Amino acid sequence: MPKNEARLLEVLGTDKASWNNNCLVPYPREFDKQIDLVAEAVQIAQSNPAKAKAIVQSLDTEPMKRWFIDVALWSGAWRAERVGLHEKRMKSLGIRKIVSQKKLNDLFAGDKWRCRYCGIRVAGNRKHFKKFAQAIDMPELIAGRTDESRHGLYLMLMASYDHVLPVNQKGTNDSTNLVTACWCCQFGKYKYSLKDLGLTGPIDTELVKSDSWAGLDFKSGE
């Protein structure tokens, strides 16, 4: 897909001194209100699935989709190009190994279901989305094969794991090198290291205020 140059220039600009040091680009804080409503839906997903579905369907998630596609996906490349890394060829030094679902669940829980870069609350991976979509009878939540056809919540709140030190720079699957990352930050960071992109490192989740958010684990609301 082509870059949205105008949006990237508006959001990130070309002044490296103004770039955020914790993440590639902070997510729009108005999304938190939408996530609050998702949390409400999760709490009643089992006892009142129809109402939970109505809540999710009432959300305007198009801005989330546009943020992911137009800004987040390109944020790392945008920064890399402006510090001269577009000419840096990355030689593969390893193969990305699959992390088990159990290890992922432990990782998400340990990171308080937050992206360790931008701090957004994440919903979980496809397994969590599928379970929630089935519980509230909303298959469109996990439908689509392209970013343009996928649901905004799916794109914005999908969680994955990121190698702090990339695999192509000898990063391993050791727990000290894995952090929870939203798709925005994971795909934006791409193959680059924190140093490459001028980032200081994952945020400390111990500093995050504890609450009841546990992704799309609707059983937690019983």
Image: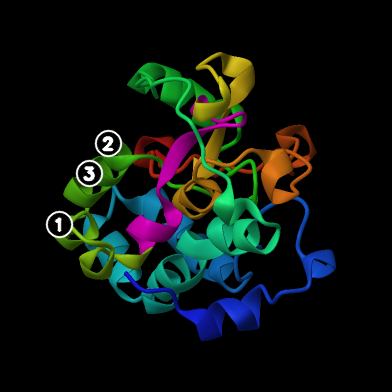
Residue nearest the viewer, comparing 104 with 71: 71
Q: Secondary structure at mark 3?
A: helix
Give whichever of discs 3 and 1 has the lower sequence position.
3
Q: CA distance from mark 1 to mark 2?
A: 13 Å
Look at label 1 and name its amino acid. Pro
Question: Which residue is at 43% across, 74% downward?
Answer: 3
Give the residue number, with chain letter if any, for mark 2.
127
**In this orientation, does residue 120 appear?**
no
Which segment is the magenta one?
A: 153-167
Residue 150: mark in rendering: none
Residue 130: mark in rendering: 3
Question: Which residue is at 63% across, 41% downward?
Answer: 116
Q: Position of residue 64 (x, y in %)?
A: 44, 70
Look at label 2 and name its amino acid. Lys
Residue 139: mark in rendering: 1
Q: Position of residue 125 (x, y in %)?
A: 35, 39
In the displayed structure image, the side of residue 9 where residue 101 appears, left or right: left
Compared to residue 58, the image places residue 95 above or below, namely: above
Q: Reply yes or no: does residue 104 show up in magenta.
A: no
Q: Residue furthest top?
A: 174
Question: Which residue is at 17% across, 62% downward?
Answer: 140
